[in-house]
Image: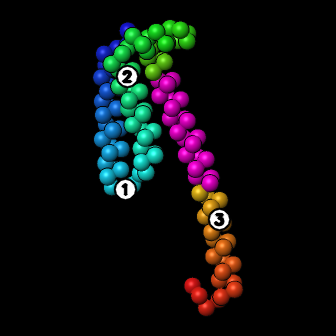
Amino acid sequence: MLPLYLRILLVLGALLSLAMVGQQVKKNKILIEDAVFWVVLAAVLVIMALFPGLVMSLAYYLGFMSASNFVYLVVIALLLWKVFTNSGEISRLKAKVNELAQEIALAHKDHPDRR
């Protein structure tokens, strides 16, 4: 069985992340599409906490020694996926900034009096 402290920790973590995401969306510091990931992650944590039998069954069928190891792996995998997608977005933004800087430099070359 999933230990009670881990179930409580999952629910508290989910509620904390929802509160933080809501606050960041309200302050326009995070986009809605980015907030969706964190809301889904919080929902996954709550489902894991409320239905430990499901987690234990999945852990057993996938060959994990304990349900806790499965929960940690799921959370780590989701966070690694988020880091990977963020890296791709950062790479695209860096390329766009470089392209825009080159366009500005070319525009200033043709019109040196404009800044």
Residue at image coords 63%, 76%: 104
Q: Is residue 24 left or right of residue 68?
A: left
CA distance for labels 1 and 3: 25 Å
- Classify the position of the C terminus by image quarter: bottom right
Residue at image coords 39%, 26%: 45
Task: Look at label 3 and name its amino acid.
Answer: Asn
Counting every numbered tag in the picture gives 3
Location of residue 37 in the rendering, given as x and y in whole percent from the top left corner: 45, 39
Q: Earlier in the sequence, mark 1 or mark 3?
A: 1
Q: Is residue 98 left or right of residue 33?
A: right
Mark linked to residue 47? 2
Queried whether the magenta region covers residue 84, the answer comes back as: yes
**Extent of the magenta region:** 72-92
CA distance for labels 3 and 2: 43 Å
Q: Measured along the vertical axis of the image, is residue 47 above or below residue 89? A: above
Mark linked to residue 28? 1
Q: Is residue 66 visible?
A: no
- Classify the position of the N terminus by image quarter: top left
Mark linked to residue 98? 3
Q: Earlier in the sequence, mark 3 or mark 2?
A: 2
Q: Measured along the vertical axis of the image, is residue 46 above or below residue 25? A: above
Q: Is residue 75 visible?
A: yes
Residue at image coords 66%, 77%: 105
